[in-house]
Image (cartoon, rainbow, N blue to C red):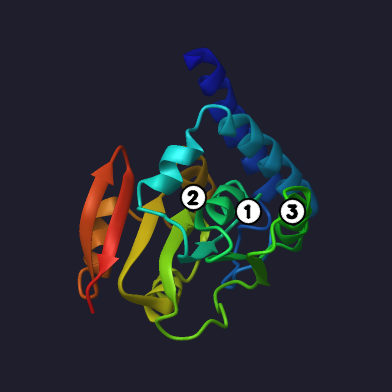
Amino acid sequence: MCLKLSCIFVGELILWGILNFKTMQNTNTQKPMSWLAFQVMSLMMTIRKRFRNIGEEINLAGIKKGLYVLDFGCGLGFNTIPAAKAVGKEGRVFALDISEQAISITTKKIRKHKLDNVELIQSDCDTGLKDRSIDLVYLHNTLPIVKEKQKVLDEITRVLKTGGRLSYMSRVGSRIYGQDIISDSKLKDMLSADFTLVTEKQGHLVFEKVS
């Protein structure tokens, strides 16, 4: 297994460098990945998914029936689908991604699982959601790739209810893809005015909004 993970890691590093060298130069605005880059990313994420316990990841933040959840940077819908099943008909999941391809793939998965409690949002940051309307935000493997990190954190803070939770993690893959890496300690400092850390487990941080 270690050998397989090492091969995946090397493959991600080489392929991502080849596909994104030009697009990562001198760009100041957030843009979706190219079609080819997205295909490579999708393949790598699908392979990595076999080595993750996504059920444990989404449950650590305390998801339960009836919650309103924002999956910020939903990607291929790995969190979106199990989260929608967990919150049930009483709850709702808002899945946001900048990529049209990601939205399309997640849409197909929603139809396949016959879910009617998921709303898709194609955006780089603005959710269009009301203030303090969300119980739980998943920000998994997304923030390192985002250029305007503070803007994203401000939007998440705006839509979260007081007492709501932010589930954060950034695995190796997203840290490779990202240009401006943010450490866990820096993130804690950035959130300290509005959040308190309630759980930390193997790089998975769960914050509770206190303001």
- Mark 3 belongs to which amino acid? Lys
Numbered circle sitting on residue 43 = none
* CA distance for labels 3 and 1: 19 Å
- Foreground residue among 65 and 139: 65
Q: Residues within 10 Å of mark 2 (few under 14, many from 20)?
A: many
Whichever of labels 3 and 1 marks the residue nearer the N terminus, that label is: 1
User: Disc 2 marks which residue?
Assistant: 141
User: Relative to residue 60, is residue 8 drawn left or right?
Assistant: right
- Foreground residue among 50 and 80: 80
Whichever of labels 2 and 1 marks the residue nearer the N terminus, that label is: 1
- At x 41%, y 64%, the residue is 136
Q: Is residue 134 visible?
A: yes
Residue 13 sits in which quadrant? top right
Q: Is residue 35 above or below residue 128?
A: above
Under circle 1, the secondary element is loop
Q: Is residue 75 above or below residue 132?
A: above
* CA distance for labels 3 and 2: 26 Å
Under circle 3, the secondary element is loop
User: Disc 3 marks which residue?
Assistant: 114
Quadrant the C terminus occupies: bottom left
Residue closest to the far bottom: 131
Residue 122: horizontal and vertical position, in percent? 68, 71
Residue 151 sits in which quadrant? bottom left
User: Relative to residue 100, is residue 135 drawn left or right?
Assistant: left
